[in-house]
Image (cartoon, rainbow, N blue to C red):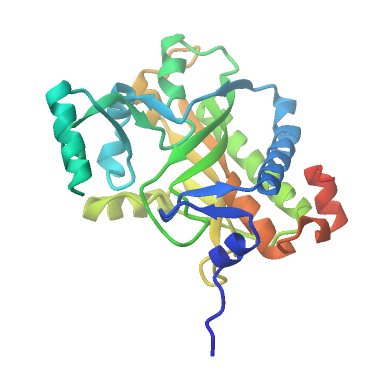
Amino acid sequence: MDAQPSLLDELLRHGLLFDTGVDGLYGRAGIFEEVISGIETMVVRIGHVDRPEVIRFPPGMNRAHFEASGYLKSFPHLAGTVHCFCGDEAAHGSLLADLEKGRDWTGGQKASDIVITPAACYPLYPIVAKRGPLAAGGGLFDLSSYCFRHEPSTDPTRMQLFRMREYVRVGSPEQVVDFRSEWMERGKTLIDKLRLPYVVDVANDPFFGRGGKIIANSQRELGLKFELLIPVSSQANPTACLSFNYHQDHFGKLWGITQADGDVAHTGCVGFGLERLAIALFRHHGFDTTQWPAGVRAELGLT
């Protein structure tokens, strides 16, 4: 009996994704991008009643800020750096010789001042800190960025380069907790409108190593992270498509962000995995968007 085609096979066969030869790195079709745009429009429709400050970051961030963030302590296995050729003509000749003979030509590359952004909120915190104490109402930000996680996989929902849309709240513990609670309800409403099945459950980040397991257990016990999970590639292991995070005062202490009264600021965020949500829609409503439920098409603005 022939094996059933995987979800990735189907997305490639229907021309929604394009194979680049690297697992987790794909081209996207026009209609795939239309679905992404529709999802973002829905997110904006819900979130912009709060009048957040809009900031758009490139897919790279300041390496010094990245190092100071502590990301490498927790997630060294996911990080991506930008290396460049910085040699002279002789070094260039050696590079070309290695390339021609099929040898590793990357040995002469040196780390640049840029790393690939791991999450849309990471470039934000040093910017907020530089402004000085927050206003009495704290801060609210609408962010978007391409992000990178080094976890190559044939599961199309685990892309190495993907887009993340975030709302980030900075302020008092009460402000941040209220923000997260409200967005958990808003997130469920959004997914209901897309007619997708889901559950919301406590979660943890993929911390590295033995010590990471202790941190992950603590994160779950304290209820600092929740995820909205949709069955996409697997019914048994649904995919996290939205995350609702309370960082407590971690980033406030790290960057010296203070509230108007001088207390350390707390932070929290809601993140939308845009490609994951798009793939969830194709998985549950079919690979031809013209056949999707009329209400879903209307919500996404598909013509």
Outermost residue, right direction?
294
Quadrant location of residue 89?
top left
Quadrant location of residue 125?
top left
Q: Is the C terminus in the top left, top right, bottom left or bottom right quadrant?
A: top right
Residue occupying the point 71% across, 59% down: 196
Q: Position of residue 246 (x, y in %)?
A: 48, 39
Q: For this rendering, which residue is in front, 231 or 261?
A: 231
Residue 7 shows up from this direction: yes
Residue 258 shows up from this direction: no
Quadrant location of residue 88?
top left
Q: Position of residue 131 (x, y in %)?
A: 46, 9
Residue occupying the point 54% across, 40% down: 163
**Number of numbered discs visible in the structure rendering:** 0
Q: Position of residue 195 (x, y in %)?
A: 76, 58
227 in relation to 144, above or below: below
Residue occupying the point 65% across, 61% down: 14
Q: For this rendering, which residue is in front, 4 or 136?
A: 4
Side (left or right) of 227 relative to 255: right
150 in relation to 175, above or below: below
134 in relation to 25, above or below: above
Side (left or right) of 29 relative to 173: right
Q: Is the N terminus in the top left, top right, bottom left or bottom right quadrant?
A: bottom right
Side (left or right) of 117 relative to 42: left
Residue occupying the point 46% across, 49% down: 25
